Image: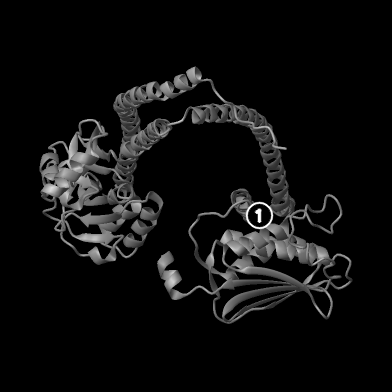
Amino acid sequence: MSEPSNETTLPPGQLALVRARPDRSVWYLRGAFLLILATATVTVYVTNQWLTTRFTATTQSRAELRLALYSGNLLSELQRNSIVPQILARDPTLIGALNSNDFSGSTQRLISFVEEIGAASLMLLDREGRTVAATDRNRLGEQHRAAPYFVDALRSNATVFSVIRQEAGAYSFSYARRIESVAEVTGVIVVEVDLAKFERSWAGISDAVVVSDSTGTVILSTEPRWRGLSETEALARETPQGAIERAIRATTDWTALPADAYLQGEAVMRTEGRLGFQGWRIVSYTTYASVRERVNGVLALEIMGFAILLALVFYFLSRKSALRVALFQRESAELRALNARLQREIAERERVEKTLEVAEQTLAQSSKLAALGEMSAAVSHELNQPLAAMKTYLAGARLLLRRNRPEEALASFGRIDGLIERMGAITRQLKSYARKGGEALSPVNMGDALASSLSMMEPQLRQRQVRIARVMPDVPVLVMGDRMRIEQVMINLLRNALDATKSVQDPEVEIILAVGETVTLTVRDNGPGIEDLDALFEPFYTTKQPGDGVGLGLAISSGIVNDHGGRLTARNSQQGGAVFEVRLPVATMDDIQAAE
């Protein structure tokens, strides 16, 4: 027995109607193809024009913002250095050196000044234009009698500014002012301003930056060959292009607005500003590369979308059967259902993301509060020692004043002033627990740092009557680091040793400083030792009673030693007590010379 067929048999009239529908559908699809093609062309053209204008305006605004920042930095540097000659022209030491012709200490004094003001160099010229003192010792004895800054300074009562082109093509910028003594000119102080650092910083970006003086001559530029030329001459000095390069430029510039200029065959927009200093102007040239990338990205998506539509049209044109049209309709219904399900899933996902965002904000706020708590506890911990020492020194000073010994009382007040400065340094340096600092390292004598730390702990050592045994090398031991932070580590280790020996009848602390492949500082006490070595350097871990400590000293010290490229370790001694070792790299001659 045969099974019933699932196929449907159409009457002859309906079959002819089904056969006629594909012919009409073909014409409809061809018309849709042409309509999509025309719509795509118009859409891409309009989108290109609109997005190009919008993104170009955004790029122009960013270029103007950068130019304002550059102008502010340049003007601030000039203004900051302009007051230096006026200050140095009144320096009694320099005036006395010019009057007595004794310049033995003048160069060192200028070096101390240049480190504070950040100028490129300082020179002291006598009335004959000879360099008698300079931060660059190679320039001692040079003659500047015919130099514009020397001649103008002698003729003027005020500070003069000079721009001089050097043999290499770069420009030097300097302020000069004459030095007078008893209404008589005795010399000239010259301050060279380092504006080349701005050229180097500007060279790291995609823009070309030019600074020209009141005559239009380029004096600063990210392109060294432009110096000494006018802006027009500088733009004309570009490599000749061949026909292929011109064709490539024409095809790559189709998304950009008309260019203000061309640099090395690339269209750029020009932004100009005034510095407000002797008629100087600053100009930047920004490429359209970012505009092209963003516009082309959107256009690519649009073209891809229209390409997908055209592919669907071609797909429909290839269909020859009315039954396939019905199948397509069923598939379309399934796609609509899938789309509805996807929309529901997207809505659910958006809701979950919003919930997650709220949770992340709550977690971030909790982390901030926890960080604030840690920092507050760290400040309290690190300031306890200077405050205790200040209290001791104040009591001693009060007693000395009662005994009519003011000179010794003043010495105590001097120590208190040093403690106040140290407290300020501690509040700055405590940030190293959360992040690494960016301060430059300098050579530190570990013996001097240890002596300073022991002086800081002198009141506690005297009160507790702890015997201190020191083993020191005969030669200075140098490391590269921050002396204040290294002393902070030493004081924390000494304080822990004192606390550990509170219950010992004869407290003793042994300090050993040794140098080999590394510098090793060992602090050993004869206390009960360490119970939990694994958690010793964790923040807020402490074995002290509440109020005696918060458990941040060793965590901060470990972070400081790690910042200096070293390592802080702890162990229990076989003879009893705890041993802490600080290992730091030895400072080499190259490190010391680089720091200088």
Asked which quadrant contains residue 252, the reply is: top left
Secondary structure found at label 1: helix
Taking the image as shown, residue 68 lies to the left or right of residue 390, namely: left
In the displayed image of the protein, which residue is found farthest to the top? 13
Where does the image place residue 475, in percent across and percent down from the top left? 55, 80
119 horizontally vs 250: left or right: right
**Where 329 falls versus 156 (above or below)?**
above
Q: Nearer the viewer, residue 110 or 399?
A: 110
Scheme by which the image is coloured? one colour
Give the answer, above or below, for where 152 lies relative to 573.
above
Near-viewer residue (350 or 288): 350
Name the residue type under label 1: Ser
Image coords of residue 178 (percent x, y):
22, 47
Can residue 157 be seen in the rendering of this structure?
A: no
Quarter of the picture holding the N terminus? top right
Circle 1 is placed at which residue position?
A: 412
Image location (x, y in percent) of residue 28 = 37, 21
Looking at the image, residue 304 lies above or below residue 485:
above
Neighbour class for label 1 at 10 Å: few (<14), some, many (≥20)?
A: many
Q: Position of residue 222 (x, y in %)?
A: 25, 48
Q: Quadrant of residue 144?
A: bottom left
* Residue toward you, 359 or 489: 359
Q: Quadrant of the C terminus?
A: bottom left
Left/right placement of residue 589 relative to residue 139 reads right
At a point 82% along the width and 65% down the height, the residue shown is: 532
